[in-house]
Image: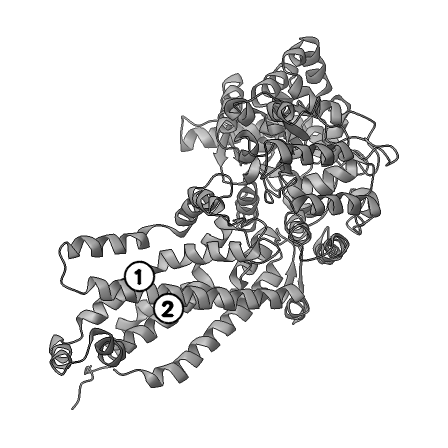
Amino acid sequence: MENRAIFSGRLLPILLVLPQLAISLIFFYWPAFQALWQSFLVQDAFGTSTEFVWLENYLSVFARPEYYHSIGVTLVFSALVAFFSLSIGLLLAVMANREIAGLQIYRTFLIIPYAVAPAVASTLFIFMFQPGLGMIAAMLRRSGIDWNPVLNGTHAMILVVIGAVWHQISYNFLFFLAGLQSIPKSVIEAAAIDGARPARRFWTIVFPLLSPTMFFLIIVNTTYAFFDTLGIIDTATEGGPNGATQTLVYKVFQDGKVGTDLGGSAAQSVILMVIVVGLTAVQFRYIEKKVHY
Amino acid sequence: MALRQFSAAALGATALACIAASPAHAVTEIQWWHAMSGPNNDVVNKLANDFNASQSEYKIVPTFKGSYADTLNAGIAAFRAGNAPGIMQVFEVGTATMMAAKGAIKPVYELMKEEGEKFDPNSYLPAITGYYSTAKGEMLSFPFNSSSMVMWVNLDALQKAGIAEPPKTWPETFDDAKKLHAAGNPTCGFSTGWVTWSLIEQFNAWHNLPIGTKANGLDGFDTVLEFNSPQELKLLENLVELQKDKSFDYSGRTNTGEGRFTSGECAMFITSSAFYPNVKANAKFNYTAVAMPYFPDVKGAPQNSIIGGASLWVMGGKPKEEYKGIAKFFTFLSDTDRQVYLHQESGYLPITKAAYEKTKASGFYEKNPILEVPLKELTNKTPTENSRGLRFGGMVQIRDVWSEEIEAALAGKKSAKEALDAAVSRGNQMLRQFERTAGK
């Protein structure tokens, strides 16, 4: 069966994709090439002196032990954020997919956090978790835990993971809920009649049928943890203490904006781009095989 | 004479052009980007309004651009796009970045000379202008808001712990911290804000120890850090020891931990003198501020403290009329009565000697002794090579690297010696990177 759109000439299809192409070129490819070009330069902050240095920026990035530390931090952070935001999002979606009173209200409330800007969210978290001021910090301290994210790296990591997960749960919830509602009720009812309990129904029917959504969300959440958590880390910990929450993207920001080392920062963002493209390719290659469309 | 006629003609032409374009705006507008929020934002606006009302040729337009780092980055981006403001407020640690950008800035001493404004560098307090001057004493930027570092003390907590008077030396501070910890401050005997400013920068100046070679970088970008001597080590080792039971408790890299003093959690807190308005408004106990502690066995200590805060930089490549207006604005700011007002209103230090003397003579410090503490520290002795100030390229990020290492030591991840050595060597790497692009 022919299900492609048929155009009589070449002109119309080209015209139709042109706006999208122009947007991609101007907002994605141009800055990417700028970053690539900048990564071969050593330049002062104001751009008054420029020197072309080939791969020196890359070599000096890889010569620093902090960079490898930062890669480790990023992997731990991203894995934690993706795992918790996906599992909590899924749990809430499954709960909200049942027939209970006030369903619409629950759903709306579960979606609202996504509308809160990351910086605002993390300011709230700072207030709650600030040793000496925050409510939650005070509670933790009363229960005998020496909560101290300004000096304890593990505490700082927990703090930024909570902030990042909290923000992403709503997004995952929304997609999981849509995915759940597209699963035909008849299949589940048939399983119920056959005597399958809810847990078994979930793992053998619902979960596999959700796999396209899951696959999509894994990619989106990894990318989120890699790039979009900059605001949370900046407001909550500034990458500290002692680099414990310094992810790769935060280091790009630090070296470029605070250190005004644009060349080194550009080199790092090119490396980061390669890592994320590679990671996404791997996900498509291996995880997608397990997906049932 | 010919030149004068020419500029008069040019001015006339410009005026005509302006009139033709929009009859209401025959004034030269000067953009002033700053980072002053809250009550200090009002001070900035008041200064601009007063200046604008005092004459009709120039109009200063202040714009708040966010934090110090945001303001600097906004200025850099604007310069790269060919759209820089006339005046930009830059924090003290951005000084090296600004002066390295030769074409991007106009040194203040040059501006004042070219525009024929009355300008005597000797009328300013050397402890303040030294930070913003070349090795030859030429003033590069105009000091705006300056502060220094003092130790804030909760007198009620001291009394509770049976301590008669605030500590003067570091050994006394350590002892008192233990007593305070045992008495009423179990989670924080004492602490500091701005960790590298207090434990490295001020500590070294106050003890007449070098932070780096070449007069802490004031004499050249080929400076090498050297603050890993036994004295700095002694301080850090003591703090690491006290951190274990929270007789000393770390409060972060900037001033976000200052609330721990006003809330009463920390009994003593070493931080900026500009903390004053906040303490006055929020502390519900008897308090005072005293000079920073020192080690009595270090020769020449205490020396003098250094400043923090920000100065006003004039950007390069602006039209002549704008420079004329900026020069007049700086003269306006230097006025003694205005400086006296600024000092007493904002708690920042006066920048001219005359303003300091006048405030002193008026008996202001008898009523507000806290405000004189930083001034006494700054003028304690004639500044040496080690205590004039510091100028390290990329200082904003260097501070982060130093903080990371201090955090590693306090958390017990590294020994104090390893941390200090790493802070020095990592800082040196960054200095070499900066040197490559600086001043070419």
Q: In the rendered structure, are the residues bearing label 2 and label 1 in contact, judged by CB atoms less than 8 Å apart? A: yes
In the image, residue A272 above or below residue B402: below
**Figure colour scheme:** one colour
| Crowd around label 2: few <14 · some 14–19 · many ≥20 (10 Å) | some
Counting from the top left corner in percent of width and height, residue B112 is at 69, 29
- Left or right side of B179 for A72: left
- Residue sitting at x 79%, y 45%: B234
- Mark 2 lies on residue: A220
Of the two numbered discs 2 and 1 on the same chain, state the one appearing first in sequence.
Answer: 1
Give the Cα distance between marks 2 and 1. Answer: 10 Å
Which residue position is annotated with label 1? A171
In the rendered image of this protein, does residue B140 appear above or below residue A198? Answer: above
Coordinates of residue B143 in the picture (x, y in percent):
66, 30
Seen at 27% across and 76% down, the residue is: A207
Q: Is residue A174 left or right of residue B282?
A: left
Say which element carries label 1: helix
Q: Please name whichever residue, A102 or B19, is drawn nearer the observer in this view of the structure.
A: A102
Quadrant that contains the C terminus of chain A: bottom left
Observer-nearest of A73 and A116: A73
Task: Examine the image and state in which quarter residue A92 appears.
Answer: bottom left
| Left or right: A78, with A88 as reference point | right
